[in-house]
Amino acid sequence: MFSHITLGTNDWPRARPFWQAVAAALDLPVLFEHEEGMAWGEMTGPKIFIGPAYDGQPASCGNGTHVAFLAGSRAAVDAFHAAAIAHGGTDEGAPGLRPHYHADYYGAYVRDPDGNKLQAVCHSSKG
C-alpha cells in the first residue's frame, strides 16, 4: 500500500539507539545507514527512512500523524514497546488488546526521541 515513510530527526546520534532497538524488536532488515540517518526495509518493498528533513529546516512531528508497524506477534508488540521505552521513547499506550478496532487487535503506542508517534500492531490472536 505504501512505498516508504520518512520521519525526521534533529539529532541522529540521540535517535540512533532508539531506532536500532525498535527495528530489531520488529525484525526489520537494515537497508542502509549513513552519518545522518538510517533506513530499514526492502529495496523494492516497504521501507522507513530516519534522518534530517530534506529541506534543511528543523524536523518536526505531525499532530494527528502516526506510523503503525505490522508486528508478527503480540510478543513482538511487547518487545517494540519495551525497546522504545528503554531507549528514550515515551509511552503513548501500553501493549494490549484494542477490541474497539477488532477482537484480535493488539497494539502499543510510543513517541520516538523527536516526538514522532509510532505504533506496533498484531492483528492475530496467535503469538
Image: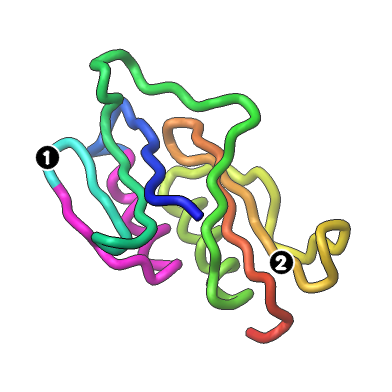
As drawn, 68 above or below 29: above
How many callouts does the rendering have? Answer: 2
In front: 37, or 84?
37
| Residue 60 included in the magenta stretch of the image | no
Q: Residue at x 47, y 41 (%)?
A: 112
User: Circle 2 — which element?
Assistant: strand
Q: Residue at x 54, y 64 (%)?
A: 70
First in residue order: circle 2 vs circle 1 = 1
| Circle 2: residue type | Tyr
Q: Position of residue 48 (x, y in %)?
A: 36, 49
Q: Is residue 44 left or right of residue 85?
A: left
Region of the chain picked out in magenta, as a range? 15-33
| Circle 1: residue type | Glu
Q: Which residue is mark 2?
A: 106
Tell me the distance, in whole angstroms, between the alpha carbons under discs 2 and 1: 35 Å
What is the residue that sits farthest to the left in this orientation? 35
Q: Position of residue 87 (x, y in %)?
A: 41, 50
Q: Which residue is mark 1?
A: 35
